[in-house]
Amino acid sequence: GNFMGLLNKPSNAVQPQGAASAHYQNSAYTSSPVADDTTSLLHGTMVGQKSETRRMLEKATVTWASSTFIIIYCVVMVYSVYYNGGIEPLNVNPMIGPSALTLDKFGANNAAQIKYANEWWRFISPIFLHAGFVHLGFNVYVQYQIGSELEAMWGTMTWIIIFLLSGMGGNLASAIFLPTSIGVGASGSIMGMLGAWMLDLIIHWSDDDPENFLDPQDAVFARKNRRRTIFMLLVNIIITFAMSVVPLVDWAAHVGGTVFGIILGAHFFGHDVIGACSKTITLVVSLLLLTGITLYGLWHFYNEVDPCPDHQEGEPYTNLIPPTC
């Protein structure tokens, strides 16, 4: 349920004459076809020497994590419906999926179970669960569009860390702000991925300066394409936040995932900020922010949040309502 359908898959748009074979001035490296394809997919054309060299030397060229996660989503979705004995009526679960009780048994974000039964792993497991096939379809579509490309550019481990920590941050926010709801879905992780991508684009904005290209038209094309990409990112983030007021949509997971993704983006890509002082400040402040928000969030959840104010002793800590997603 993130409703980010406006985000188009980064595509290799028609490039200016000679863009595909351009080389950088004073570059000690030549571009490999894989690196060229990855960079052009995400930036529209070849970007500056520093950015391309960094990606060539440090980042993965083979991706598997994003696709593997999608397969896990689908397998878990099908099995949860099978375990449930079929799809629930639409008046029970309008997302066309299993019951809230089944999702809870599979590891949904249940604040009461986390707090009172110490099932901390529920901060992670909801990422791989979905409320139904409608919810699954939205998330798989967005992740399929951009997940593998970002994984190729960032590297598999960086992508996994950003994706999972953003999802965990979103689930923590959901447990704090929506403690009486059952929460599932990878929307928080996806929003974090988009937030980190936006930071990456902003930090590497100067890579498109004309001096990095033999043909200035290539730089103009790249900069226009990047503006368009950031615009589309912002539009989708705004639409997602706007749709967060719709019933059954977990607005807290969306917001929390985005905040964690932006901070993680600043930390992982902050080493490319211009200026030693600015670089150090970016890396240190982002790490302190991430640590501080996480610790305070956990303290607040375990000390201030009451997920079951009407709970009777002996009853399961399960809210039998349609899940948020």
Image: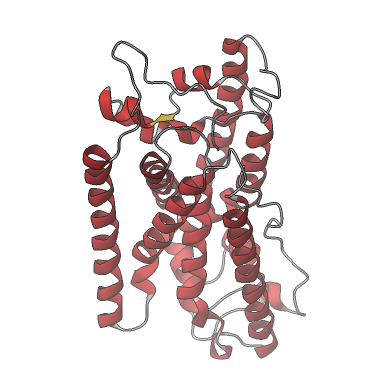
Nearer the observer, 57 or 161: 161
Whether residue 65 is visible here, answered yes or no, is yes
Q: Position of residue 323 (x, y in %)?
A: 54, 30
Instruction: Please state, as top left, top right, bottom left or bottom right, where the N terminus lies in the image.
Output: top right
Q: Position of residue 300 (x, y in %)?
A: 25, 45
Q: Position of residue 95 (x, y in %)?
A: 66, 30
Q: Residue at x 53, y 48 (%)?
A: 190
Total numbered labels placed on residues in the image: 0
Task: Identify the residue at the far front of this view.
Answer: 310
Nearer the observer, 221 or 216: 221
Vertical relation: 287 (above or below) 167: below
Q: Is residue 113 toward the left or the right of residue 254 in the image? A: left
Q: Residue at x 47, y 56 (%)?
A: 258
Nearer the observer, 274 or 303: 303
Nearer the observer, 213 or 294: 294
Instruction: Please state, as top left, top right, bottom left or bottom right, where the C terminus lies in the image.
Output: top right
Q: Position of residue 72 (x, y in %)?
A: 54, 29
